[in-house]
Amino acid sequence: MDSATSLPFAAALARGPLVLDGGMSNQLEAAGHDLGDALWSARLLADRPEAVAGAHLAYFAAGADVVITASYQATFEGFARRGIGRERAAGLLGLSVGAAREAARRAGGHGGSGERPRWVAASVGPYGAMLADGSEYRGRYGLTVAELERFHRPRLEVLAAAAPDVLALETVPDTDEAEALLRGVRGLGVPAWLSYTVDGDRTRAGQPLDEAFALAADADEVIAVGVNCCAPDDVDGAVATAARVTGKPVVVYPNSGEEWDADARAWTGGATFSPGRVDGWLRAGARLVGGCCRVGPGTVAEIAGVVRPSGRRHP
C-alpha cells in the first residue's frame, strides 16, 4: 500500500488521537469554486483536480493529520448522469485518493525522521448523497440492505484499490445503510470507520444510537465508530455511547452548528462549534476529531492546538 507512512493507520490511532480536516465544500467555495451541481465537490475531480489537492493541502497546513477525499458524492450512477462512463468514473474515484496523496506529499508528510505522518481517508458517502436531494439526512430510501450493498460495493472496491489508509463510511443516516456498508467492506483489506449523522441520541432515521453502534462492535474491518455532519451539541452523548457499546476508538467531526435551509439553499444562524469542546470528547474516547460542513482550516488549527498542545499528543 502506498501509505503516507509505513505505520498502519490503526496502529497510529492506538498511539494517540489524530486531527481530521474540515469541510471540503466550504474550502473549495472559499477558493472561488462554484459547487452548484448535483455532483457537488466531486465535479472538480473531473474539471479541476488541482483545486481538490489545494483544499487538502490547506487542511494539512492547518494541522490536520488526516484528510478525507472528495469522493463523498462521487458514484458511478451520479457520473453517468453527466455522461461520464464507468471506466472514466473509476479513474476519477481513484483520482480522489491520488489528489489527497499528492497534497500529503507536498505537505512533507511521508513518515520520515522528524516528519508528522499524513493520512488519507477515502470518503464513502451514503446512497442519498448520489440522489442530491437531501435524503441522506432521512435515510430509509425504500431499498433493501442487499440493494444498498450492491450500490456501494463497486465504489468501495475501486476506492480500496487506490490504496487509501482508511475508508470513511460517513454521514450514514440509518442502520440499514450501515449494515450494507459493513457487508461491503468485507475482504477489501483496508480498515474503515463508520460514522452516522444523528439528531440527538438517534440516527437521522430515528434508531437509538446504542443499537446503531452495536452493528460495528464485532466488525473486524471497522477500527473506529462515531458521528459526523451533525450539530456540535449532539456529539457529547454520541461519543460516550459509541465508546461504551463498541469499545473502539471514536471518530467525531460535527458541522459548524449553522443550519442548512434547503429551500433557500443557504446556511443560516451562527456557528456553535467551539474547539473548547474537544478536550471533553477526547476524554470520553474520541481519537479522531475534526469538522464537517462549514468548519474551515482556522477551526482545524484550533482543534490541533487542543489535541497536540505544544506539539505533544493528548494523554
Image (cartoon, rainbow, N blue to C red):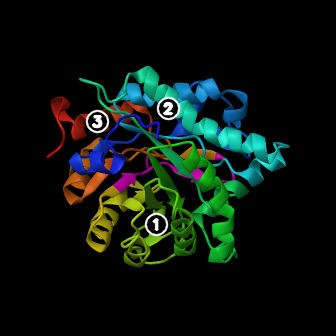
Q: What SS does tag 2 mark?
A: helix
Sort mark 1 into few (<14), some (14-19) or many (20+) by Cα contacts within 10 Å.
many
Q: Which is more foreground, mark 3 or mark 2?
A: 2
Mark 1 vs mark 3: which is more N-terminal?
1
Our reading of the magenta stretch's main secondary structure is loop
Residue type at the position of mark 3: Ala
Q: Where in the figure is residue 186, as x and y percent of width and height?
A: 51, 65
Please, which residue is most extreme toward the right here? 83
Gap in Å between the C-alphas at discs 1 and 3? 26 Å
Q: Which residues are magenta?
A: 251-265
Quick check: 58 left or right of 285?
Answer: right
Q: Which residue is mark 3?
A: 304
Q: Which residue is mark 1?
A: 199
Residue type at the position of mark 1: Asp
Q: Is residue 253 magenta?
A: yes
Can residue 132 be seen by looking at this rendering?
no
Q: Which is more foreground, mark 2 or mark 1?
A: 2
Sort mark 3 into few (<14), some (14-19) or many (20+) by Cα contacts within 10 Å.
many
Residue type at the position of mark 2: Arg
Q: What SS does tag 3 mark?
A: helix
Image height of 93 relative to 10, above or below: above
Compare residues 249 and 162 and report the one nearer the observer. Answer: 162
Find residue 138 and report its image quarter: bottom right
Sort mark 2 into few (<14), some (14-19) or many (20+) by Cα contacts within 10 Å.
many
Q: Where in the figure is residue 159, as x and y percent of width and height?
A: 58, 48
Q: Is residue 16 magenta?
A: no
Q: Where in the figure is residue 276, as x and y percent of width and height?
A: 25, 44
